[in-house]
């Protein structure tokens, strides 16, 4: 998507912000990046590319300052698969782009390619550094029945979905940036 391209109306962008941030030791979604909370920094990068950006979180009050729709999990504390199922039930677009709340930079070229592939295939995930990244991916509402079946079986990981319904894979040369630990954050802001 280059300058002047209309934001996607068929895909809703979703920032997943339901994790416990155990490795960081503090809520990483609210870490300051360039004078604003990380989650706001991410949302501002996604806004020009999507007609709809929302947050998947179980503490709506914490993100009210964003002025974005917040979608809580249908059943709290059941992991990212429940978050994705809840989002797919709530949106009215055929697909969602899911991104973790700990990625300070949206790699535009990778996002553009991911969205291009999603025009042909309902589920597309990036692979960087050797492994699939289920939190930089496009999922389809048509996967909801499969998701609900996995949840009924006690599955909770995004990889459970990717194993049950393998996505088209976008190979990336560089590793997707994320801030999981204090040293990652210090390196990024330093």
Image (cartoon, rainbow, N blue to C red):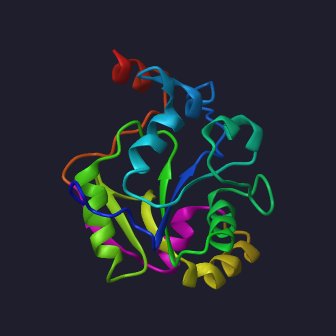
Q: Nearer the viewer, residue 154 or 26?
A: 26
Q: Nearer the viewer, residue 79 or 11?
A: 11
Q: Which residues are magenta?
A: 156-172
- The residue shown at (68%, 69%) is 90
Q: Position of residue 79 (x, y in %)?
A: 68, 56
| Residue that extends furthest to the top in the rendered view of this protein | 190
| Residue that extends furthest to the right in the rendered view of this protein | 75
Give the position of the C terminus as an image quadrant.
top left
Is 57 rendered above or below residue 61? below
Q: Position of residue 103 (x, y in %)?
A: 42, 41
State which quadrant residue 141 falls in: bottom right
Q: Position of residue 48 (x, y in %)?
A: 38, 51
- The residue shown at (45%, 33%) is 179
Q: Is residue 26 covered in magenta?
A: no
Q: Position of residue 21 (x, y in %)?
A: 61, 34
Q: Is residue 168 covered in magenta?
A: yes
Q: Nearer the viewer, residue 13 or 66?
A: 66
Is 125 rendered above or below residue 163? above
Is 122 rendered above or below residue 35? below
Q: Is residue 114 left or right of residue 103?
A: left
State which quadrant residue 80 falls in: bottom right
- The residue shown at (63%, 33%) is 22
């Amino acid at each position: 998507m280059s300058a002047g391209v209309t934001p996607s109306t068929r895909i809703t962008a979703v920032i997943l912000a339901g994790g416990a941030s155990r490795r960081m030791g503090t809520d990483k979604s609210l870490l300051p990046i360039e004078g604003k909370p990380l989650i706001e920094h991410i949302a501002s990068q996604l806004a020009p590319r999507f007609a709809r950006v929302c947050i998947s979180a179980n503490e709506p009050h914490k993100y009210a300052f964003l002025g974005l729709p917040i979608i809580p999990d249908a059943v709290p504390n059941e992991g990212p698969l429940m978050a994705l199922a809840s989002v797919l039930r709530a949106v009215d677009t055929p697909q969602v782009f899911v991104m973790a709340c700990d990625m300070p930079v949206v790699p535009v070229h990778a996002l553009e390619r991911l969205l291009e592939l999603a025009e042909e295939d309902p589920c597309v995930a990036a692979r960087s550094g050797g492994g699939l990244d289920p939190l930089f991916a496009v999922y389809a509402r048509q996967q909801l029945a499969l998701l609900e079946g996995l949840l009924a079986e006690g599955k909770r990981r995004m990889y459970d979905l990717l194993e049950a319904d393998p996505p088209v894979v976008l190979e990336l040369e560089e590793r997707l940036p994320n801030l999981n630990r204090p040293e990652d954050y210090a390196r990024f802001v330093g």
